[in-house]
Image (cartoon, rainbow, N blue to C red):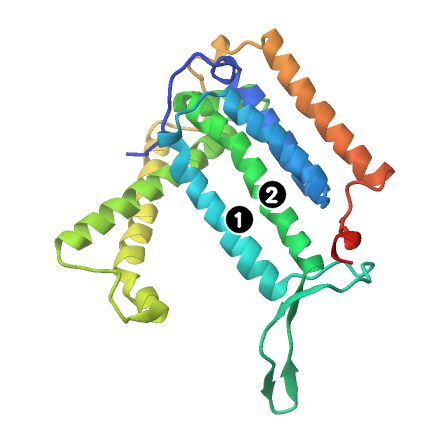
Amino acid sequence: MLATFKYLPGHSLIHRLDPRTKLAAFVLVMIATIVVDDVRVLLALFALSFGYYLLADLPWRSTWKAWAVVLFFAVVIIGLINVTLFGMAPTYIKSFHPIFSFPTIKIGSFVLERTVTWEIAFVGFARMLRPLAIMAMILPFTFTTDPYMYGVAFRRMGLSDGVAFALDLSLRYVPTIARDFFTTVDAQRARGYELEVKGGGIVNMIRRSAPLIVPVTINSIAGGEEVVEAMELRAFGVGPRTWTASDTLRFQLADYVVMGFFLLTLIAIIGLRYLSPYGPYWFPAQWFE
């Protein structure tokens, strides 16, 4: 059986919005994060997104795990590893304010030198803010929207039955994989399996993860085949699909206000990016002089 994201019924403004409005707001903010590289603009955009998240009135105990995963991804994977090892400041930035340097590595005639500067760090700050702003928009959708309305919302947005159903299954795929993973972990631990072995190192940990990855992958493939067979038995795609509760979706004044607000926000950010000095990469060199 396919799992779904946890749905928390409520009476907040975000709960009362049409699912299509939440999707449109999410897409608009996601595009806005791609347009700009200026830390100041991205901070303002994150503040707007987080304000939208707060309007959903979601309990922290239900969302902290999702925030923890995104914070780890944003800070560790993007901010520390990716930017520190591979990040580069724009070529038109001529200032150079080092933070630290890695030891020089010499292999024959090959010399590897890497210095992390504040210019590179500001690239990292901008990249870290992007997933945080996007998460602040997607959490209200997943927690305040009945999972059975996902496909209906996609279909009412003008997508075909096949595309709407595929997107619906994609949203259900993530929590299904998470459920199967933790079920497999519990089953393996009941058999005496331990992923964390003292002194094993990260290489040994990766090697020992096979008893988790293989069953989860096989279950995912088998589950996908079951869904395909179930759709074929119901002759999916032969004729138009009847979407239950499709006629219940109606745009209200609040929906137009929210969509208009984020659309204007996107237009303003595009204007800042291409018609003003705000939007491209920004570095306050005077702070370090």
Q: Amino acid at mark 2?
A: Leu
Q: Residue at x 41, y 20 (%)?
A: 146
- Residue 157 location (% of width, % of height): 58, 22
Q: Which residue is mark 1?
A: 74
Q: Residue at x 64, y 13 (%)?
A: 256
Q: Residue at x 62, y 68 (%)?
A: 100
- Residue 198 location (% of width, % of height): 25, 67
Would you say residue 6 is visible in this rendering?
A: yes
User: Nearest the camera: 212 or 237?
Assistant: 212
Packing grade of label 1 (10 A; few <14, some 14-19, many >=20) is: many
Would you say residue 240 is visible in this rendering?
A: no
What secondary structure is found at the residue carrying circle 1? helix
**Circle 1/circle 2 CB separation < 8 Å:** yes
Q: Which residue is mark 2?
A: 129
Question: Quick one: label 1 or label 2, which is nearer the N terminus?
Answer: 1
Horizontal side of residue 235 vs 29, given as left or right: left
* Separation of residues labelled 1 and 2 (CA atoms): 8 Å
User: Nearest the camera: 198 or 274?
Assistant: 198
